[in-house]
Structure formats: structure tokens, C-alpha cells
Image (tube, rainbow, N blue to C red):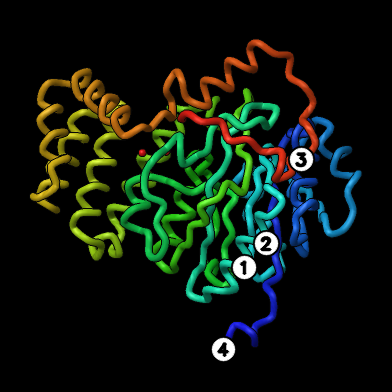
Amino acid sequence: MSRSDQRPLTVSVIVPTYNRAAFVGAAIQSALDQSRVPDEILVIDDGSTDDTPEVLSQFAAPVIVVRQPNRGRSAARNAGLAHATGDAVIFLDSDDLLMPECIERCAEALEQNPEVGVVYTDAYLCDHNAEPLARYSEAMPGSRPSGMVLGELARRNFLTIASMVRRECLTGIEFELGMEHAEDYDFWRRLAARCQFEYIDQPLMRYRFHEGMTVSSGLGATLKGEIEVQRRFLAMPEFAQVAAGLQARAYCAHGIKNAMFGATDVARKCFWRAIRANPAYPGGYALALASLFGKRALQFAILKRRQLAGNQLGTTSGPMALANKRRASQQVAAPPSPPRGEDVVAVQGGIHG
């Protein structure tokens, strides 16, 4: 079928929320202010006990509010998927914001490339007031591949949750209940085994760092969740089919995360698996050697390696640390109006890898 014979895709925005009265209104408004307004905005109120219901009552169609007892973020997103009628869905956490052209750009990418199932973009990493601190691609340098990305995705999660998915690709796939850390990474893992991804090199959302967010309040649990998802990646039959070089890098990445969690013996085994997968990849040898000197030496080598790569996530000069400093020095103001494209100024500097 030629592109001219296809009708435009309908789009559903899924917004899970729990006690986000201070932020959810701005998130919804950012979806309403799109250059291509979505066909429906499904807000799943997961048993909020604050003023969230009152905030949501101010919105009318295309905003649809679904209320359920508190069951967690994965259950809320799954409820959104169950209610969605769009040809494509895009996820928006209730403390984040979409840039005005996000839906238009992502939907066009799906419409122009029928083989693509997931479209993801760059993002602004912001403080609690949604003021940009850095671009995600600056904070976590590295490839953002298009096509079949399973091998690269096994190394690290380079997607934000605000990615658009063709709904026909979601048959049998939903967020895993009980996995409240790295559940999005596991979701992308299963999609990467069945469809192509496409990257748009433009920041089309604002990801907000604030005190109540899951990442800042549970870094150890998030790392543990990522380790579990990577373990699942490495056990997939599809992973055995990716290029040897990508396999080696994925084994090393899994070893690095285990090392940062303190599991040096597990990490060393991963580095040797990387060497067996691709003897020509030097990273496995260097990390395996460092592991022989114990946990502290290995962790030091990993941190230096990340610094050389320019990865600033988790560092004292990274966006999360800067956001915490701003929050400590300012009284938290009410969230500003949803940003317009011309208002954005990317902060140079740096902040999942």
C-alpha cells in the first residue's frame, strides 16, 4: 500500500498518575497543546489520595479519566493500554511534559515507515520546575540506533518512557506487574524482539527530576531492576542471533552493573563471557583484569571508563545532582505553563550505560 492510500494514524496518550496533583495538570496540558492533537488522552488515576482528582476534573474531551484502586505504575499503564483505541500509543508520566511537536513528529515517522513499531526521541532533562539542565543525549552519550535494536538495547536503556508504539505490535505485551523499577526497560526488551525502532534526534519531551520521582528515591532498586532486565535479554533466543561484537558489549554492560551492585564474582564471569563471544573485543579483557584486583578496584575502573565516555548520569555534576541542588536552594514553585518550542534553551554540559 502506498503512503497516499493510508489514513493518518489515530493516537492515544496514556498518562498514569498517583498523587501528582502538583504536576499532572501541566502534563495533560502539554498533550493538549500539541501541533497534532491526540485523539484521546487516557489519564489513569491509580488511587490518588491528594488533590489529583480535583485537578483532573478540570479537563474535558479528549481527556478521559479512568480511576482504579492503587495497584502501581505498571498496572496503571496496562489499564491505559486496555482502554486505548488509537492506532498508536504514546506514554507520558504525569510529572513530565511533551514538547508541542512530539506527537506530530512521532506519528509521521510511523506513517512513513510501516515496518517501524517504536519511535523514540531525545529529551530535555529538567529540574522540578521543568527548566532544562541538559539533553539526554549529552548526559548519556552513545548510539541511538534505528532498525532492530535488541543487541544495543541489551547494553543499556536509551529510551525514555515518552515513546510512541504502533498498537498492533503490542499483542501479548504489557508492563509486568510487580516490577516497579526498570519496568519500561523490560517492556522495550520484548518489543525489540519483534519490531524495528526509529530514533528522532530532537528533544521532544521534558523529563523532570524531583524529590518524589522513582529514580531519585530508589537508585539501588532501579539498578537491581536493570540487572534483572539485562539477565532476561541475555537469555533470549533472539540475543544469540545478534552480532558477536554486540553480544560482547552487552555481557560487559551486564558485568558492569553487577560490579556497581557489588557482585564482583558475577561481573567477572560476565567479562569472560564477553571474551568468549568476541575475542577481538578489548573491553572484556580490561574489565576482567580489573576484576582480579577486587571490588573497589573494579568499581574505580568502571567509573573512570564512564568518565572517559562522557557519561554524567549519577555524577556530582550531572543533571540529577544539579536538580537536587536547585531544589535545595529554592522554594519549589508551582509548575510553569507547558513549554513552547521557542522557549527551550538546551543547557550545555552533561548527565542508563
* Structural crowding at the residue carrying mark 2, measured as other residues with C-alpha within 10 Å and reported as few (<14), some (14–19) or many (≥20): some
Q: Residue beneath label 1, please? A: 108
Q: Secondary structure at mark 4?
A: loop
The amino acid type of the residue labelled 2 equals Glu
Give the x, y percent position of residue 264.
Answer: 21, 28
Q: Amino acid under label 4?
A: Met
Which is more toward the observer, 353 or 186? 353
**Numbered mark located on residue 338 in the image:** 3
Viewer-closest of 164 and 122: 122
Marker disc for residue 39: none
Q: Which residue is mark 2?
A: 104
Q: Quadrant of the N terminus?
A: bottom right
Q: Is residue 163 left or right of residue 187?
A: right
Quarter assignment of residue 171:
bottom right
**Residue at (71% x, 70% y) in the render:** 10
Could you tell me how far apart the alpha carbons at marks 2 and 3 are, in whole angstroms? 17 Å
Measured along the vertical axis of the image, is residue 289 above or below residue 86? above
Q: Are marks 4 and 2 in contact (CB under 8 Å)?
A: no
**Which is more N-terminal, label 2 or label 4?**
4
Which class describes the residues within 10 Å of circle 1: few (<14), some (14-19), or many (20+)?
few
**Which amino acid type is marked by label 1?**
Glu
Local crowd size for mark 3, using a 10 Å CA cut-off: few (<14), some (14–19), many (≥20): many
Residue to which mark 4 is pinned = 1
Q: Are marks 2 and 1 in contact (CB under 8 Å)?
A: yes
Compare marks 3 and 4 and give the one earlier in the sequence. Answer: 4
The image quadrant that residue 255 belongs to is top left
Q: Amino acid at mark 3?
A: Pro
Separation (CA) of disc 4 from disc 1 = 16 Å
